[in-house]
Image (spheres, rainbow, N blue to C red):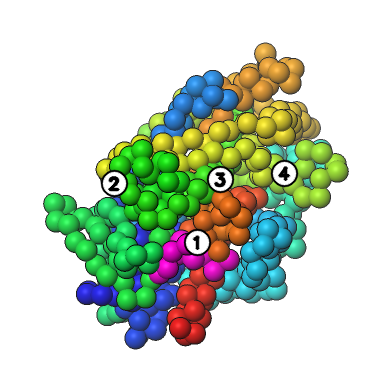
């Protein structure tokens, strides 16, 4: 395809949505570039298959952070999807929109059109909700959302334990309120993952006005003056340049989008000049404002068999596979977690500030195999961390990974929330409902009793929950990167549409709001084109 109207860089959670929506107009030509491969690995489409595709260089970028001072110098793995669908093809499938107040805050920061009332129609438009349509939910959209197909006694007990300590039962955290406990819904249909590559891109690829190129590593943007005119990319040894008649749209995610901007001369001038890159536009916010949810895992040895026992028994493991093959149910239809708890650590808070992910299994980390003893995991994360980090290139080579500096636990509030979350974990585990299941606490371990000891344990065991956002933040201030229509400040013909534009991270898993952002962006792009 020569001179498409729109070049979209990145076929992930946002890029697939945007390519599908923009190509609905047969007169609009769209080129979608994806650095990874196709989503042909069968494990991509099996919900529990994320265990197989994480840490696999064929499907995962396999990023690592710089050593984190607040985590006692540990570097963390930061998996990101490297295939059609991006991280929506590798995530835990958990469908969480966030709190209405999240989006109202975006609007209060000066981003007109991003209040909850503004964005709710896009959540609804995207959704094909198994429970049916309502004032909060939609049916018939590309993104399937379905109920959990697995129930476990220990999961029911964890919900009951949360209720015992005053957390209400809430079977729809994407409805009138988020606070409460219940079973997650998944981005799945009939027991199979519904990534944006499946829900949006697959039907759209039949259109002659949409071209998808995989294994396309973008080297940089081509500028004519201060306008983005096209993209330079490589497929294997062959380097190509393509011109955009209308716009270039970066959908490469919270790591990839700021990296591409910096490589192309848009970013902090001092950083660019240090690496021999001539600045096109000094934009100091590019790569700043990095936010992520830091999870602290508590692991308990269980008095009853858990999924650990089933997976480690060859006969029972075969039965799990057979159940999924015949019925699309059972453990292979599970997402990354089964039960949620959204709660407040302080009574004066208006909305929940922590989230639990509960699993009837335990492992040192995804992809490394389950423990060979009966156990369950309760992870807790702070929903609205104050700590911010940054993404910065370390080399002008587009194949060189940037420095990822999350800057976790940098504030008093964040450290207090970590300790409070661990104490709430223990309160639920010590409830009457959970006592028949709990043999002993393995992580962080009973030796950690004081606030200082619990914080030190958190520093040693905390991991990312894979929600990087904010590095091309939307807003109007000196460190904003895009405006409320997602146009990059100071240059023309260029937008960013992905989780990097979130000015403040949403209160929960970030895939659903990223899809919403792309749905809304498609309408804005079409409206702006009609006016031009």
Residue behind mark 2: 398
Q: Quadrant of residue 432?
A: top right
Please tell me the numbered disc located at residue 181: none
Mark-to-mark CA distance, 2 and 1: 23 Å
Residue found at the far right of this picture:
348
Residue 118 in view, yes or no: yes
Of the two numbered discs 2 and 4 in the rendering, the one whose residue sits closer to the viewer: 2
Of the two numbered discs 3 and 4 in the rendering, the one whose residue sits closer to the viewer: 3
Residue behind mark 4: 353
Q: Nearer the viewer, residue 74 or 88?
A: 74
Is residue 531 inside the magenta stretch? no
Residue behind mark 3: 289
Q: Kindly identify the residue that appears in the image at 58 percent across and 40 percent down.
A: 388
Mark-to-mark CA distance, 2 and 3: 22 Å
- Pointer 2 with pointer 4, Cβ within 8 A: no
Q: Nearer the viewer, residue 76 or 277?
A: 277
Q: Quadrant of residue 134?
A: bottom right
Secondary structure character of the magenta stretch overall: loop
Q: Which of pointers 2 and 3 lies earlier in the amino acid sequence?
A: 3
Residue 425 drawn at (x, y percent): 70, 32
Q: Which of pointers 1 and 3 lies earlier in the amino acid sequence?
A: 3
Q: Tag 3's secondary structure?
A: loop
Pointer 2: residues within 10 angstroms few (<14), some, or many (20+)?
some
């Amino acid at each position: 395809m020569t001179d498409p109207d729109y070049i979209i860089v990145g076929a992930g959670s946002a890029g697939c949505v945007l390519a599908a929506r923009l190509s609905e107009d047969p007169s609009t030509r769209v080129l979608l570039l994806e650095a990874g491969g196709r989503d042909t690995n069968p494990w991509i489409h099996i919900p529990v298959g994320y265990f197989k595709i994480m840490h696999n260089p064929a499907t995962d970028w396999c990023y690592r952070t710089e050593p984190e001072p607040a985590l006692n110098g540990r570097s963390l793995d930061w998996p990101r999807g490297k295939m059609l669908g991006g991280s929506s093809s590798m995530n835990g499938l958990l469908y969480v929109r966030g709190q209405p107040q999240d989006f109202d805050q975006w609007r209060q920061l000066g981003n007109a059109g991003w209040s909850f009332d503004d964005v709710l129609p896009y959540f609804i438009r995207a959704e094909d909700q198994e429970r049916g349509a309502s004032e909060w939910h939609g049916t018939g959209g590309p993104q399937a959302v379905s109920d959990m197909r697995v129930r476990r006694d220990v999961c029911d007990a964890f919900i009951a334990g949360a209720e015992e300590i005053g957390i209400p039962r809430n079977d729809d955290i994407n409805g009138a309120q988020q606070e409460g406990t219940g079973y997650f819904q998944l981005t799945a249909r009939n027991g199979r993952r519904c990534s944006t590559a499946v829900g949006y891109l697959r039907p759209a690829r039949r259109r002659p006005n949409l071209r998808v190129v995989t294994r396309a590593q973008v080297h940089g943007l081509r500028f004519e003056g201060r306008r983005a005119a096209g993209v330079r990319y490589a497929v294997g040894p062959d380097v190509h340049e393509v011109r955009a008649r209308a716009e270039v749209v970066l959908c490469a995610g919270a790591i990839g989008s700021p990296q591409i901007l910096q490589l192309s001369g848009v970013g902090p001038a001092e950083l660019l000049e240090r690496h021999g890159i001539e600045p096109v536009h000094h934009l100091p916010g590019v790569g700043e404002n990095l936010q992520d949810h830091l999870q602290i895992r508590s692991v308990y040895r269980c008095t009853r068999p858990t999924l650990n026992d089933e997976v480690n028994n060859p006969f029972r493991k075969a039965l799990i596979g057979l159940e999924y093959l015949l019925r699309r149910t059972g453990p292979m239809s599970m997402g990354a977690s089964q039960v949620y708890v959204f709660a407040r650590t302080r009574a004066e808070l208006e909305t929940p500030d922590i989230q639990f992910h509960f699993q009837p299994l335990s492992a040192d980390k995804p992809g490394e195999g389950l423990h060979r003893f009966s156990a369950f995991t309760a992870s807790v994360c702070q929903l609205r961390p104050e700590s911010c980090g940054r993404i910065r290139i370390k080399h002008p080579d587009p194949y060189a990974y940037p420095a990822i500096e999350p800057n976790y636990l940098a504030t008093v509030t964040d450290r207090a929330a970590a300790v409070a979350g661990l104490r709430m974990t223990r309160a639920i585990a010590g409830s009457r409902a959970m006592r028949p299941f709990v043999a002993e606490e393995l992580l962080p371990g009973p030796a950690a009793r004081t606030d200082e000891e619990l914080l030190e344990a958190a520093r040693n065991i905390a991991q990312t929950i894979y929600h990087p956002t904010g590095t091309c933040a939307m807003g109007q201030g000196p460190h904003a990167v895009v405006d409320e229509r997602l146009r990059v400040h100071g240059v023309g013909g260029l937008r960013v549409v992905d989780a990097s534009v979130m000015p403040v991270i949403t209160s929960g898993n970030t895939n659903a709001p990223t899809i919403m952002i792309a749905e809304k962006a498609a309408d804005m792009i079409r409206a702006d084109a009609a006016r031009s």
